[in-house]
Image (cartoon, rainbow, N blue to C red):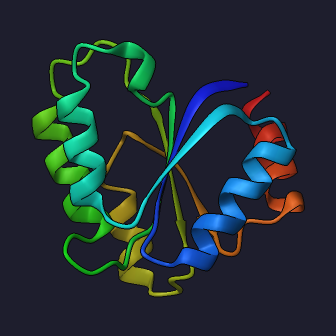
């Protein structure tokens, strides 16, 4: 479906699980994982002129140290404002906090809130919803 996916999550287990499911379901040809939004934004900035290294889809955790998912989204909107092709962004979080869900709705670039953990069934539902 996609060429390049980013998984941005501070949990090694959740990053590995998401990467495995994405690959097994052939959701993306390549997956790059980041443990925080700062590193992901740095990758985007460094590869600004290299479209092969820019994601078509991003799976983003909300609660992370250094920079949370909302901080990433805010900075992404500033840093990548002139980008023509924007990736599909999915929040992938275990948060059950209603204020987090309301906050996600304030970002039109976010396509969907997905509850962790990423499983084959969750991915199958996502694929079906995108068709």
Looking at the image, residue 39 sits to the left or right of residue 62; the answer is left
Q: Considering depth in this image, is 80 or 49 the residue closer to the camera?
A: 49
Q: Quadrant of the C terminus?
A: top right
Vertical comparison of 112 with 122: above or below? above
Q: Quadrant of residue 67?
A: bottom left
Q: Considering depth in this image, is 53 or 97 the residue closer to the camera?
A: 53
Vertical comparison of 19 with 42: above or below? below
Q: Quadrant of residue 105?
A: bottom left
**How many labels, in total?**
0
Residue in the picture at 80% in, 39% down = 127
Q: Position of residue 97 (x, y in %)?
A: 45, 87
Looking at the image, residue 66 sits to the left or right of residue 131; the answer is left
Residue in the picture at 46% in, 68% down = 9
Q: Considering depth in this image, is 40 or 101 the residue closer to the camera?
A: 40
Q: Position of residue 114 (x, y in %)?
A: 62, 63
Q: Considering depth in this image, is 23 or 119 the residue closer to the camera?
A: 23
Q: Quadrant of residue 100?
A: bottom left
Residue in the picture at 27% in, 71% down = 68
Q: Position of residue 38 (x, y in %)?
A: 21, 58
Looking at the image, residue 1 sits to the left or right of residue 88; the answer is right
Q: Position of residue 48 (x, y in %)?
A: 22, 22
Q: Quadrant of the N terminus?
A: top right
């Amino acid at each position: 479906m996609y060429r390049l996916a980013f998984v941005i999550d501070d949990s090694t287990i959740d990053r590995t699980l998401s990467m495995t499911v994405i690959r097994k379901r052939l959701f993306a040809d390549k997956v790059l994982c980041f443990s925080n939004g700062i590193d992901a934004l740095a990758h985007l900035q460094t590869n600004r002129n290299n479209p092969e290294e820019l994601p078509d889809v991003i799976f983003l955790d909300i609660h992370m140290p250094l920079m949370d998912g909302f901080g990433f989204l805010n900075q992404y909107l500033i840093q990548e404002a002139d980008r023509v092709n924007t990736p599909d962004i999915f929040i992938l979080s275990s948060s059950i906090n209603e204020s987090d869900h309301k906050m996600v709705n304030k970002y039109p670039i976010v396509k969907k809130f997905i509850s962790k953990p990423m499983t084959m069934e969750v991915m199958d539902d996502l694929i079906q919803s995108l068709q």
